[in-house]
Image (cartoon, coloured by chain):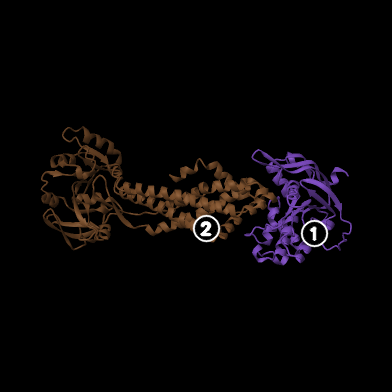
Chain colours: A purple, B brown
Amino acid sequence: MATGDISVRLRNLAKSYWRGTLEIPVLTGIDLDIPRGGYYALMGPSGSGKTTLLNLIAGIDRPSGGELEVCGHALNRLDDDELAIWRSRKVGFIFQNYNLVPVLNAYENVELPLLLADLGRAERRRRVLRALELVNLTDRMHNYPRQLSGGQEQRVAIARAIVHDPELIVADEPTGALDARNAEEALILLEHLNQELGKTIVLVTHDPKAAQHARFQIHLEKGVLDRTVEVHDRPELPRILPGPEGA
Amino acid sequence: MIWYLFIPLAPYLLWLLHAALFSPLPLSYNWRSIWQRFAGTLSTVGAIAIVVMVFVVVLSMAQGVSRAYVRSGREDQVVILRPNSRVEMMSSITLDQARLILTHPLLAQDDHGPLATTDIIVSKQVALSDGSGTLSVTVRGTTPAGTRLRSQVRMLEGRWFQPGLSEAVVPRRMLNRYTGVELGRSFDMAGRSWKVVGVFDGDGSVFDSEIWTDVADLRQAYRRYGMNSSMTVRLRSAADVDAFVKDMDRDVRLKLEAKAEPDYFASLGDAGRPMQILGQIITVILTVGAVFAAMNTMYATVAGRTSEIGTLRAIGFGRRAILASFQWEAILLTSLGGILGAFLSLLFNGTSTGAVSMLTWSDLSYAFTVTPDLMAQGVAFSVLMGIFGGFLPAWRASRIPVTEAMRS
């Protein structure tokens, strides 16, 4: 696979935490390539290091050793400010508890990543409305998080994750706080983003049903990459989203 | 005075201003967040408001005292005293000395002759209208020229005193605080009965704290034959003051101490000082409390919004944006209290009160004078509290590792 086709490249990646002088290894010797447009689910029991791996890929944590290249950037070589700028351009985040800002309405929450880009108000509005349209929440854009259901909150969070057209979407247990129907809807939406808009998605989940939506399942065991499984019986979804952003 | 405190903070303030204009996190986010915690915000705003109110009222008191003295003096008038006596009440000038001074060529003249007055100053106990006791009040025996020299003094009701009738006039401001000196009433002093025949307004000067009567009547009553307390003269111009002061000192027949009126009254300006110092001590104590209240509120804010901070940092907002954002939130919070406190201080504006001068042991009446400048200083003071109280919590917010914030 050519370097340009790789979204995430990990080589001998390691992460340890220190408790006083005691080193606690969380991840060791991780080698992984995720192609551009890939959809990978990180799975494993609690404490296996899947969220830590996701944080490293997303650039919100730093490895203790090894190489980490994501979206064409060696993250080890970026300082904190550069890393923040990199995240604002390349990564969209989806969290288990949605993590919407309570004092901002749906529109303003979705607009947040665009405030970091050099865009005029009109262009920001165009992109926010488009993202809200993708998650089918245009009619709720003036509602505050407390006025939305859990499913709607997660859709706002998904709109926020894609509004700045990132290359990579990371999702940490995105269905963990949702009921079965809303969880299924959120997962199908992610699948559409992957299939139709070509977003690379890395998803952390311990739910096998959620992991079935990914193309590959990566199993971690005690901080080590155990196995990678391809999901074969994955249905081809009908096209529902408008064309890619910026088109 | 308070503005100087901003000078060392200038680089930080400029950076904050830049952040307010160009930071990706809009101030509206902080404004709304403040109202999320309504009870906490209200109590902090209330605490800051009280401190700022006390701060402005203390300053307005000092302003009132200094205004009383500033309004009493003219640049071209000179007060003449016995050397080292400091105040008119402690001074004595003989009639011979006074006659000699009247011949000085630098004295200004009007239709009635040289603009000069020889006054006698005594004090009298007057009952406070609230029944809490008596206070020593200055009584000035003066001449017709004395009323012309103090042009800020205007007769409001009744008339000026007539010589030989034991009559007196009182300032209107005194009537708010004292009893027994109302227009038409008589009071006893030095074994005589004195009738109040007029009420005047001293335009906020020290004369608002004095009862005036005829100098000859007072001299007789106190048997101060051949002796006055002080002399006040108007010179042809303010430029003559230095030469006149030197003449008073050099003339072996006089050997008197002369001071330009503004200098003389400025030297009395300590009348309100004990209260002012007490007010400042109270302000300092309250300020420390208010800064900690602001700090506590902001620490609670940061703790309650850790996950939100983590989200913002993950999305790509830098440490500096978070620091500026939370620092601005603290400043907005304390400024609200500052504005409220500045307006609350207006409740005291114009209220008359008094302080005993440490020099004359007499009561000085003055009014709390809240000016727009003092109110602005109060708000500036609250901004400083926001900067100092908000910095550490804002710093903490900006330093929380993203992964740790996300876990909270």
Q: Would you identify the image quadrant in which residue B171 lies? A: bottom left
Which amino acid, by three-letter code, is at mark 2?
A: Thr
> Which mark, residue A153?
none
Judge the density around disc 2: few (<14), some (14-19), many (≥20) Cα neighbours within 10 Å: many
Judging by the rendered image, the residue that carries numbered circle 2 is B41
Q: Nearer the viewer, residue B42 or B66?
A: B42
Number of numbered discs on residues: 2
Residue A18 against residue A94 in the figure, above or below: above
Q: Residues within 10 Å of mark 1 (few under 14, many from 20)?
A: many
Residue B106 showing in the rendered view: yes
Where is mark 1, residue-wise?
A: A210
A181 or B385: nearer the eye? A181
| Quadrant of the image occupied by residue A154 | bottom right
SS of the residue under disc 1? helix
Q: Chain of mark 1?
A: A
User: Disc 2 and disc 1: Cα gap in Å?
Assistant: 43 Å
Q: Nearer the viewer, residue B304 or A70?
A: B304
Q: Secondary structure at mark 2?
A: helix
Rendering coords of residue B144 (x, y %): 19, 51
Residues marked 2 and 1, same chain: no
CB within 8 Å, label 2 to label 1: no
Q: Is residue B74 left or right of residue B378?
A: left
**Looking at the picture, how far across and down is residue B14, in whole percent?**
56, 44
The residue type indicated by label 1 comes to: Ala
Residue B154, quarter of the rendered image: bottom left
Res B161 seen here: no
Residue B106 x, y percent position in the rendering: 24, 39
